[in-house]
């Protein structure tokens, strides 16, 4: 028997390159989705906040996916974000929308560095210890588009005191930080964003959220009664002359920061709705494989009518996914034309997702509407996703106006 000298032994195969932080986080997605799906019905039924689900998202590294590399984060892109949110939407839409708003906050910080260094460092420290949820609180009861906020900030001895009520505050009961829009009570009021700790004195969560769907998202009202905010945590309160200069610089940029923020919002929430619709389709496929009515000898899936209807759903969702994911890649490249299209894309993707789930319910009849099955929950969640969509009329009017302006230039 021959022997091989030690220095002639075959070399061990070299390991491949280590996965990037984004790849490592994405690798944990399937397990997280399964965990979310296992408890989604319970949280929906009881309208309880899915703390364990959020913890699972955090442990997988998904809740900080968009923290920029200069802050030690993975630096996830919008394309990465829509991929994650579409999958989380398959498991639990409420967890997905709560996650979305935190990811949007970190992404905006990556683009604009709007948070003060010390404040953002504190948020990241908390994020290493556990889930640190963040959301921007803009909406107010009875408010109209373009109006200054009714929430008032009053200067008092080195700090601002915030008083007002915010509504539709997704994740309200679990937010570590709230970015609250408010106007000052000065003779010439200024509008800014005030970074508020979730456990601040004078802050109360009013449990008003009792919607048809997204029941576990805890999108309650937040009431502020002279909540104290240090001066360094008040953002955007520039003197008029400084604001003018900053606005001029922003307008000179290829894509203004506010438009990029809106594009991220549009596509992130679109992805959640499409993910919900994909779960509805998955359930429908299982139903069509298993359901054999008494007057048939084969499952419903063997009938051309049902296959054609399922194909219609598949076509709708393929279109929505290609639209959302394709635009996300282009927004990551800061293409102005892509950024301008995300509002209509949000509308079309949400319409497609809603139509797909409604068709699934129609095909299944009574079983699809039974609380014993998740399809009716998917329908309620996708219908309620419209709370994150601008009114159809506003989106379409803006798209029409842009088309007219484009036509006038040619």
Image (cartoon, rainbow, N blue to C red):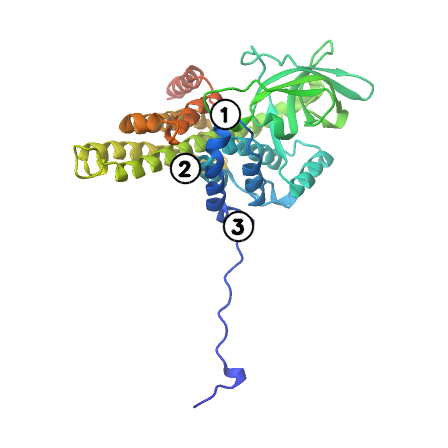
Residue holding disc 2: 326
Specify which label sits upstream in the sequence, 2 or 1: 1
For residue 273, side relative to residue 230 (left or right)? left
Extreme residue in the bottom direction: 1
Tag 3 residue:
24
Query: Dots 1 and 3: beta carbons under 8 Å?
Result: no
Mark 1: few, some, or many residues within 10 Å (few <14, many ≥20)? Answer: many
Task: Please tell me which residue lies in front, 194 or 212.
Answer: 212
SS at mark 1?
Answer: helix
Where is residue 109 shown, x and y percent of the image? 62, 34
User: For the point 40% across and 26% down, which residue is it?
Assistant: 350
**Furthest-right residue in this view:** 157
The quadrant where residue 176 appears: top right
User: Circle 3: is it few (<14), some (14-19), or many (20+) Cα within 10 Å?
Assistant: some
**Mark 1 lies on residue:** 215
Q: CA distance from mark 1 to mark 3?
A: 30 Å
């Amino acid at each position: 028997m021959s022997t091989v000298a030690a220095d002639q032994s075959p070399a061990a195969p070299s390991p491949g390159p280590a996965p990037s932080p984004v790849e490592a986080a994405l690798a944990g997605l399937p397990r997280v989705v399964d965990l979310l799906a296992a408890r989604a019905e319970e949280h929906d039924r009881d309208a309880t906040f899915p703390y364990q689900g959020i913890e699972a998202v955090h442990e997988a590294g998904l809740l900080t996916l968009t923290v920029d590399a200069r802050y030690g984060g993975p630096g996830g892109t919008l394309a990465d974000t829509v991929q994650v949110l579409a999958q989380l939407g398959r498991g639990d839409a409420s967890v997905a929308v709560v996650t979305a708003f935190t990811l949007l906050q970190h992404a905006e910080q990556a683009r604009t560095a709007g948070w003060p260094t010390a404040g953002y460092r504190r948020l990241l420290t908390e994020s290493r210890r556990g889930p640190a949820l963040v959301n921007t609180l803009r909406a107010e009861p009875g408010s109209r588009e373009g109006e200054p906020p009714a929430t008032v900030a009053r200067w008092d001895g080195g700090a601002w005191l915030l008083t007002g009520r915010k509504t539709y505050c997704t994740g309200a009961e679990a937010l570590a930080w709230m970015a609250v829009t408010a106007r000052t009570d000065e003779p010439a009021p200024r509008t800014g964003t005030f970074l508020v700790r979730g456990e601040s004195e004078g802050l109360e969560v009013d449990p008003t959220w009792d919607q048809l769907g997204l029941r576990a998202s805890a999108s309650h009202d937040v009431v502020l009664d002279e909540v104290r905010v240090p001066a360094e945590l008040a953002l955007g309160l520039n003197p008029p002359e400084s604001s003018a200069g900053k606005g001029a610089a922003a307008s000179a940029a290829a894509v203004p920061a506010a438009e990029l923020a809106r594009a991220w919002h549009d596509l992130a929430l679109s992805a959640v709705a499409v993910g919900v619709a994909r779960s509805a389709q998955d359930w429908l496929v299982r139903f069509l494989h298993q359901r054999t009515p008494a007057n048939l000898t084969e499952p419903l899936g063997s009938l051309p009518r049902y296959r054609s209807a399922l194909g219609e759903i598949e076509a709708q969702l393929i279109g929505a996914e290609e639209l959302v994911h394709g635009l996300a890649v282009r927004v990551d490249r800061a293409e102005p034309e892509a950024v301008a299209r995300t509002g209509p894309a949000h509308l079309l993707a949400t319409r497609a997702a809603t139509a797909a789930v409604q068709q699934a319910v129609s095909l299944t009849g009574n079983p699809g509407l039974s609380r014993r099955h998740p399809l009716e929950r998917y329908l309620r969640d996708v219908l309620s996703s419209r709370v994150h969509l601008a009114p159809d009329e506003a989106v379409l009017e803006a798209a029409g106006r842009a088309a007219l302006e484009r036509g006038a230039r040619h």
